[in-house]
Image (spheres, rainbow, N blue to C red):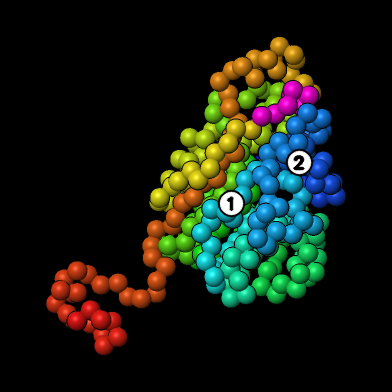
Amino acid sequence: MNKEQELKNIVKERYAKIAEQGKAENAASCCGATTPSNKIYNIMMDDYSETKGYLEDADLGLGCGLPTQFAKIQKGDTVIDLGSGAGNDCFVARHETGVEGKVIGIDFTPIMIQKARANAEKLGYNNVEFREGDIDNMPVNDAVADVIVSNCVLNLVPNKQKVISEIHRVLKPGGHFSISDIVLVGDLPEALREDAEMYAGCVAGAIQKSEYLQFIEDQGFQNITIQKEKPIVIPDDILSKYLSEEEVNEFNNGETGIFSISVYAEKTGAKSSKPKFKLSELQSGSCCEPSSGCC
């Protein structure tokens, strides 16, 4: 088994257990994967409670941002949520798309899919569906989505470039994404970087902020924007499981930073299905139709 598959299996196994944990336990740890801290609550997650469409039963306390807040979702849009968990961001997105739109959640943990489907049925949502699969090989056809959102998930996938390539594939021309994720500035101590628990905890799997943004640019996305950024502070009682007291002090006083960022970018192309014309054609009047108003 290759290293990439081993990491995926670690995450899948850990998140099957996390699905059965309470929100408070998840929110007081690193994405629910580490021992909860007795010093800081909501280490990574943002508060959804005032967000329209929010369902408390679907909030497992695993996010690190509010991507749907920045996603510019319109009525009738098709939205895909990567790593949809129990469905929280999908239900918020569904509030924005309305009954005219469609929301697809993708997750590779079967118990998360079961929880999400149960929540959707409880709400009576017929335009929200959940598909089991990997986000680096999405069970979705090309050019399906107007908008893609994701909340603290790409850092869990070993091949982030492949995920970004998949995002580009399934977005319609002119579509866009808003993704909240964990990134680094500076190098993590080796003990944190190598620990499986910290990988599943959204920290050890994070890459450099500059590299993350470069992957997006290399894929051909445009108008790349950081919509929100906040530092993530890991409490000493969690760090001390992996580092000596001296190493904890060095880490806290060093130049390494762990950040939650919400990133927005657009796929090139135009959403409109109307034909596009050259300026010369417009000037000559050859393109005009009675309803176009261009003549």
Splitting the image into 4 quarters, where does residue 128 fall?
bottom right
Which residue appears at 66% of the width and 29% of the height?
233
236 up-or-down from 87: above or below: above
Splitting the image into 4 quarters, where does residue 278 fall?
bottom left
Amino acid bearing label 2: Ala
Find residue 95 and name its label.
none
Which residue appears at 76% of the width and 41% of the height?
27
Q: Which residue is mark 2?
A: 27
Side (left or right) of 177 relative to 173: right
Which residue appears at 67% of the width and 22% of the height?
190
Amino acid bearing label 1: Pro
Magenta residues, start to end: 233-239
Which residue appears at 82% of the width and 33% of the height?
35
Q: Calculate the distance from the C-alpha at mark 2 to the C-alpha at mark 1.
A: 17 Å
Q: Where's residue 54, x and y in %?
A: 70, 59
Splitting the image into 4 quarters, where does residue 26 fall?
top right
Q: Where's residue 208, x and y in %?
A: 54, 33
Q: Which residue is mark 1?
A: 67
